Image: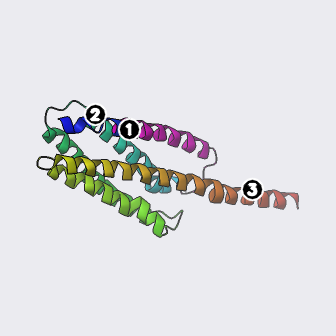
Amino acid sequence: MQEFTKWDSFYVIVGPASGALIGLQFVVLTLIAQRPQAGVPEASAAFATPTIVHFSSVLLLSALLRAPWQTVTYVAGAWGAMGFIGVAYSVMVGRRVRRQSVYRPEFEDWLCHFFLPVMAYAILAFSSFLARSHIRAALFSVGAAALLLLFIGIHNAWDGVSYHVFIAMRKAHLEEHRENQQDKE
């Protein structure tokens, strides 16, 4: 499986990056949890949890592709299954985004929380069919899917933190300030 060894550096970089970003997400969510707001669980299931799933998918892909497989068939089956499960999960996330009432999603939200993840997981799923006859193209497809999921996760994590810092916390501070003013009167 000489073709896999050419990808060593790629997965040595991508895997730990996704693992570190998972850790940072936990830190950020812990800090945000200090000021809970109404409707956060349903918004979290739509926006925060999928980010962890995408980072975890990249981490798992990195581990799978660094394992000493004897043949491409098994690893391609594993990443193909991940892809099909990821597409199904992304469809569930799309439903959650539509149902949650905390935030009205814009085009960018639909793009980064639904359409791009579906595309990344579909690439992953269908590249498994290429693996036996076109291993090089299949591995490039897997690499592209991994990078896309990593960048989606980075975007969504940043977007979520920005929303909480610049919108939600500001609203909470304004409401707190109004209540204090009313108490003084």
In the rendered image, the residue lying farthest to the top is 68
Disc 1 or 2, which lies upstream in sequence?
Answer: 1
Q: Quadrant of residue 13?
A: top left
Quarter placement of the N terminus: top left
Residue for point 59% across, 57% down: 163
Residue for point 64% across, 60% down: 167
Image spot of residue 33 (x, y percent): 59, 45
Q: Is residue 99 visible?
A: no
In the rendered image, the residue lying farthest to the right is 185
Disc 1 or 3, which lies upstream in sequence?
Answer: 1
Question: Magenta part mainly helix, strand or loop?
Answer: helix
User: Residue tagged by mark 3?
Assistant: 176
Q: Quadrant of residue 123?
A: bottom left
Determine whether the residue tagged by mark 2 lies in a helix, strand or loop: helix
Tell me how far mark 1 sits from mark 2, CA to CA.
10 Å
User: Residue tagged by mark 2?
Assistant: 66
C-beta proximity under 8 Å, tags 1 and 2: yes
Point out the stretch of residues depicted in magenta: 11-39
Q: Amino acid at mark 3?
A: Glu
User: Residue tagged by mark 1?
Assistant: 15
In the rendered image, the residue lying farthest to the left is 133
Q: Amino acid at mark 1?
A: Gly
Image spot of residue 158 (x, y percent): 54, 52
Q: Amino acid at mark 2?
A: Arg
